[in-house]
């Protein structure tokens, strides 16, 4: 009976001790940012055109919304959809895409950065699946290349409503 509090204290101490370690890159190592100028989306012919257009539109809006205050290496992104899969479940469908993003320098065309990742979205309606997956992919690209999230235009209209009560 006396061993239970001793073991609990030892586990708590070991947990706090292990939480003090960091696995990520050190703070003395600066992260490299890029001034993204444009993006191109490419895929095989069997991949949905709506998915490609959604990614292109959303990443393009993020590039336009990003404002850099300092001079950074200028790059153009090439987004390639390697594979898009569909997995049916009891309720809805899970869509998964393997994505490769390469950043090529504007000055000489050399690839100076690359990101390879998988993105997935779960949709109950197949008509919305491409837009959901495009949103997930563009969110990941925004996060990896430090692009701003575009603001939504929310203008109020003063036009008279056509709905009668």
Image (cartoon, rainbow, N blue to C red):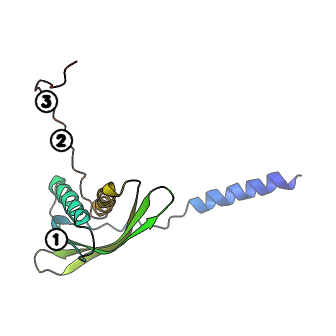
Query: Badge 3 is on which residue?
Result: 157
Tag 3, which secondary structure?
loop
Q: Position of residue 115 (x, y in %)?
A: 32, 73
Q: CA distance from mark 2 to mark 3?
A: 12 Å
Residue at 25%, 51% (x, y): give it. Answer: 149
- The mark that comes first in sequence, 3 or 1, is 1
- Camera-near label (2 vs 3) is 3
Residue 127 in percent (x, y) is at 31, 56
Q: Quickly name the residue at label 2.
A: 153
**Quadrant assignment, res 74:** bottom left
Q: Dot 2 lies on which element?
A: loop
* Residue 152: percent from left, percent from top: 21, 44
Query: Mark 3 touching mark 1, by CB under 8 A?
Result: no
Location of mark 1 (residue): 76
Classed neighbour count for the residue bearing mark 3: other residues with Cα under 10 Å, few (<14), some (14–19), many (≥20): few
Q: Where residue 67 appears, x then y in whole percent?
A: 16, 54
Question: For numbered disc 1, what is the local secondary structure?
Answer: strand
Return the residue nearer the eye: 71 or 86: 86
Is there a contact, CB below 8 Å, between mark 2 and mark 3?
A: no
Depicted 20 relative to depicted 74: above or below: above
Location of residue 33 by image quarter: bottom left
């Amino acid at each position: 009976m006396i061993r239970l509090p001793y073991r609990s204290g030892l586990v708590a101490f070991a947990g706090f001790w292990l939480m003090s370690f960091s696995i990520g890159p050190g703070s003395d190592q600066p992260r490299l940012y890029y001034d993204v100028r444009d993006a191109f989306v490419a895929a095989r012919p069997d991949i949905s055109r709506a998915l490609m257009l959604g990614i292109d539109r959303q990443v393009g809006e993020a590039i336009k919304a990003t404002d850099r205050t300092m001079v950074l290496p200028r790059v153009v992104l090439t987004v390639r959809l390697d594979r898009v899969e569909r997995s049916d479940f009891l309720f809805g469908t899970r869509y998964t895409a393997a994505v490769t993003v390469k950043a090529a320098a504007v000055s000489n065309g050399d690839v100076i950065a690359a990101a390879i990742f998988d993105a997935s979205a779960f949709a109950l309606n197949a008509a919305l699946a491409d837009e959901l997956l495009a949103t997930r992919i563009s969110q990941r690209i925004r996060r990896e290349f430090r692009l701003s999230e575009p603001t939504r235009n929310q203008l109020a209209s003063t036009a008279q409503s056509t709905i009668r009560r």
